[in-house]
Image: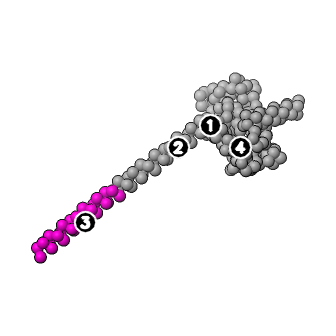
Amino acid sequence: MAKSTNSDSELTELNHELRLQVDGLREELHRIQLQNDALQELVRNLQRDAMTDNLTGIWNRRYFDLEISKYQSRLDSTGEAYCLVLIDFDHLKQTNDEFGHVVGDAVLQDVSERLKSASRPTDILARIGGDEFTLLMPKTAHAEAKELVAALSSQIDLSGIGERAWEVRRRFGVRNPCDDGHKKVEVSLSFGVAQAIPGEPVARLLDRADRDLYESKKISRKQKA
């Protein structure tokens, strides 16, 4: 009888120790899972930072290159159309030279926000150079892209951007030369559109969009003249 009582006591103690060990392992597993989630979130944030333009907060050239490669592969394999839009900030260099890079940067940030807000949720806006931006339009043919760009251009109100840019400069105690009747900060955009072709190198697509951009600039200059 005494042996049975001792055995039961030992089993109870053993079960208790096992439960403690299991609880400890569960806590450790939970801690590891939390650490893993935190590391995954850190990796996602680092990846996003690496793909984001520091000045404007939109996508950068690296992300654009990855995405347009995917779009082209999808076009080659399934025939799904897409268009590339090149967007150029006219006279940005002149703005930087006359008013300083602080004003030029403020203009870029302001216009970038307006472009992003006016674009479709499925479109991908990226800054690929100093004053060069791109808009990737998935599942979009050339005629539709042209209509969308025309609508986009009319929706973006560029008035007042120069004055808001100067608000940034005033924080540094620099007076707006416009107050003395001098030249104002002028902002305008030009667009070039090209539809991708199956099997075409991306560089050639960019070149076609660039040529369309050049033609739109020529037409704009003639209209102003």
Q: Is residue 174 magenta?
A: no
Which residue, given by chain and number where applicable, does mark 3 sit on? 15
Disc 4 + disc 3, Cβ < 8 Å? no
| Image-based side of 105 in relation to 90, left or right | left
Segment colored magenta: 1-26
Residue 108 position within the rendered picture, expressed as x and y whole percent measured from the top left: 67, 35
Colour scheme shown: one colour
Mark nearest the camera among 2 and 4 is 4
Q: Nearer the viewer, residue 179 or 114?
A: 114
Front residue of this view, candidates 109 and 167 = 109
Q: Amino acid at mark 4?
A: Gln
The alpha-carbon separation of the residues under discs 2 and 4 comes to 27 Å
Mark 1 or mark 4, earlier in chain:
1
Residue on which disc 2 sits: 45
Q: Which residue is mark 4?
A: 72
Query: Which circle, 1 or 4, is nearer the viewer?
Result: 4
Q: Which residue is the extreme one toward the left?
A: 2
User: In this orientation, does residue 180 appear?
Assistant: no
Kindly report the distance in space between the C-alpha atoms of the residues bearing marks 2 and 1.
15 Å
Cα separation between marks 1 and 4 = 16 Å
Q: Which residue is mark 1?
A: 62
Whichever of labels 3 and 1 marks the residue nearer the N terminus, that label is 3
Task: Return the x and y of residue 133 as percentages of the image width and height.
Answer: 70, 36
Please tell me whether mark 2 or mark 3 is closer to you in this view: 3
Q: Amino acid at mark 2?
A: Asn
Q: Which callout, 2 or 3, points at the residue further toward the start of the chain?
A: 3
Classify mark 2: helix, strand or loop: helix
Secondary structure, magenta segment, majority class: helix
First of labels 4, 3 by sequence position: 3
